[in-house]
Image (cartoon, grey):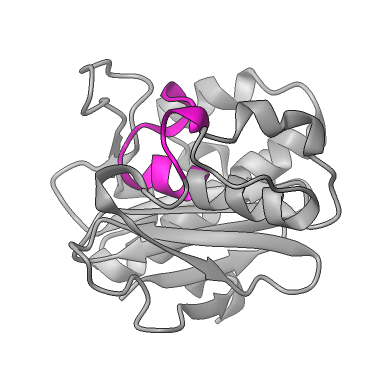
Amino acid sequence: MIQLYWCVPFANAANADPSRRSDDERARLKRLHRQSDRDLFMSAWRLTRAVLARVTCQPADRLAFDRTCRHCGDPAHGKPTIVGGGPHFSLAHCRDLVVLAVDETFPVGVDVEPAGQNIDALSSLIRHPDDPESRGVELLRMWVRKEASLKASGWGLARDMTTFAASRPLDAAVVEDVDAGPHHVAAVASLSGGCPATSGAARRESGSPELSR
């Protein structure tokens, strides 16, 4: 079953514990110029390391990640996996919320977006010809469902949403909406071979073992 972990971005997260960052995290952090983006990025990976450390029984700063793309072999833009093996995971964030999905059995994808944004102008970048006409929150929900499917299949941003219909997720992923509260829209996807992704309701935990327990 997919387990979900949530947190809000931490102030000055980009300035905390620099010695515990990987070379990849340092390089990605340097590409972010706004402090809020830097804090969001490091909050997300601090949550990821804390949760995966508990799941794998490893020190958080010893966890190493491989980003090799399983579709083209590029070592830099693939879906992150734990070096040496471990649970499947997927990370998503918007400006005020971070969510981590973990599944010990099947590849997983997750996405979250603010509920109030209007993306109607982006419909042509989201809808496949077989997708229904959608606007407002329904189009936003289609977006997060497709994004979760792309992440679970390992494509991420390397494949356009318009290449598949929401009713036919990539790799026959099971995609489910997630209750992310009144201010966000979220979904999870699992390559579980037809089994329900979350057994009806994804487990939701606030924060991380390191931060809230």
Which image quadrant is residue 65 in? top left
130 over 159 or under it: above or below: below
Q: Residue at x 70, y 56 (%)?
A: 138
Of 199 and 94, nearer the camera is: 199
**Which quarter of the rendering shows the C terminus?**
bottom right
Residue 181 image position (x, y, % from top left): 73, 74
Would residue 161 appear left or right of 172 to someone viewing this image? Answer: right
Of 78 and 46, nearer the camera is: 78
Q: Is residue 153 magenta?
A: yes
What residue range appears in magenta? 147-165
185 over 36 or under it: above or below: below
**Which quarter of the rendering shows the N terminus?**
bottom left
Residue 120 image position (x, y, % from top left): 79, 38
Q: Residue at x 26, y 61 (%)?
A: 58
Q: Is residue 25 magenta?
A: no
Prevalent SS, magenta region: helix
Q: Residue at x 81, y 65 (%)?
A: 183
Q: Residue at x 74, y 35 (%)?
A: 37
82 over 24 or under it: above or below: below
